[in-house]
Image (cartoon, grey):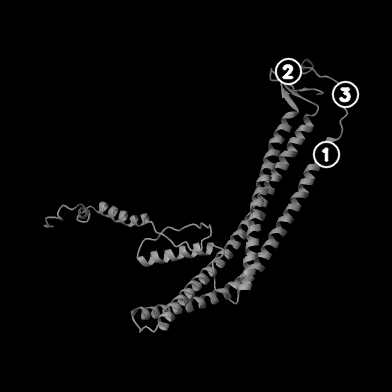
Amino acid sequence: MNHPDLIDAPCLKTFLTADFTVWEAAKKSHGAAIDDLNLSIDSENMVGAKPPLESPPRGSGARISNWMNKIRTKVALAGKNTPLESTPDDDIFNDVDAYITNLDANIKVLHKEAENLVKSMKQSSETMQQMSASFAEMGQYKLANDVIVRTPSHSLFTKLGTNWNNLSKLGAFQESSATTKLEEPMEEMVRDVQSVKIAMTKRRELLYNYSRKAALANSKSGQLDKLREAGAAPDFKSMNLEDEINTLKEESTELWTEVETVSRRLSRDIERFKVEFREKMHSTMESFHSIQKEYAEKFTLGWAEVLPDLKPLETKPVQATPESVKADEPITTTI
């Protein structure tokens, strides 16, 4: 380059450099600059709601415009008073919305408490394991000369330790079954309900876009009528308004057709969802209750296992002393 003003221009240095690494870094830094744009959005109809905003896309102005429309729609629908065009299915979807809202709130509570139930089972199993070790050690103790002294209750405490250890293992199996039979199915049902909520939101977004374009078309039609009533000759403004109105009406017609199609499909899907959800809940609870009944029976047998050894003891006050036994034998006491 021989231009006297551009030959040393810093902005062209990277472009004219043969260093591939520097050139790629410059391209990436230019693309990332779009992230620094402070894009404003129309917060009309927003009533204290703060929905999460998505990151602006990189690319053409059309893509950014579409992103802005999506954000504007989410913000508008976050308000409860956003006007929407009435449809023949309003009563049906109002009922579905109340049903799903109630279902969502309760299934989340059930899932959370199922998690807590599993945690309590795990804690109970671990506690019993620690207690079993203490029971096993309670029937004997060691003197300073390493002589082990066993009490008359040594055999009983050993049985109790073994018994509580077995019950601890049973509790661990119960915890595992509660995870697979209750917690995980509840988590899956939470996702099922969320899927329905997303589908309902998509329908509302379509209906909102239709309502917005229909309202805009009516507004512009009013402006055109005023121009015609004023007796003004057709000019660029009126012709431009008429073109905009026709475009908006065409777009509204397409959106309305899509709203009707989605509404019919969603109505069928929700009825199927209600049946499947009811069956899934029924199956989950039947399976969980059955397995808990089995564990309850096993726990009953486990608790009863040592009851014969826990009858009142008749002991004679005979005191054993370290001198009455050999050094390498454990000492038995009446304590």
Q: Quadrant of residue 204?
A: bottom right
Which residue has dot 3 on it?
316
Q: In the image, 328: left or right of 49?
A: right
Nearer the camera: disc 3 or disc 2: 3
Q: Quadrant of the C terminus?
A: top right
Q: Quadrant of the N terminus?
A: bottom left
Q: What's the CA distance linking mark 3 and mark 2?
A: 24 Å
Other-residue count near label 3 (Cα within 10 Å), few / some / many at <14 / 14–19 / ≥20 = few
User: Which residue is at a point 45% across and 62% down the rendered structure image?
Assistant: 42
User: Which residue is at a point 77% across and 43% down the rendered structure image?
Assistant: 302
Up/down of 249 relative to 40, above or below: below
Along the polypeptide, which appears first: circle 3 or circle 1?
Answer: 1
Q: Position of residue 26 (x, y in %)?
A: 28, 54
Q: Position of residue 315 (x, y in %)?
A: 87, 26
Say which of 241 and 94 sits in front.
241
Give, as a three-letter code, the residue at label 3.
Answer: Lys
Which residue has dot 2 on it?
327
Q: Quadrant of residue 7?
A: bottom left
Q: Quadrant of residue 6?
A: bottom left
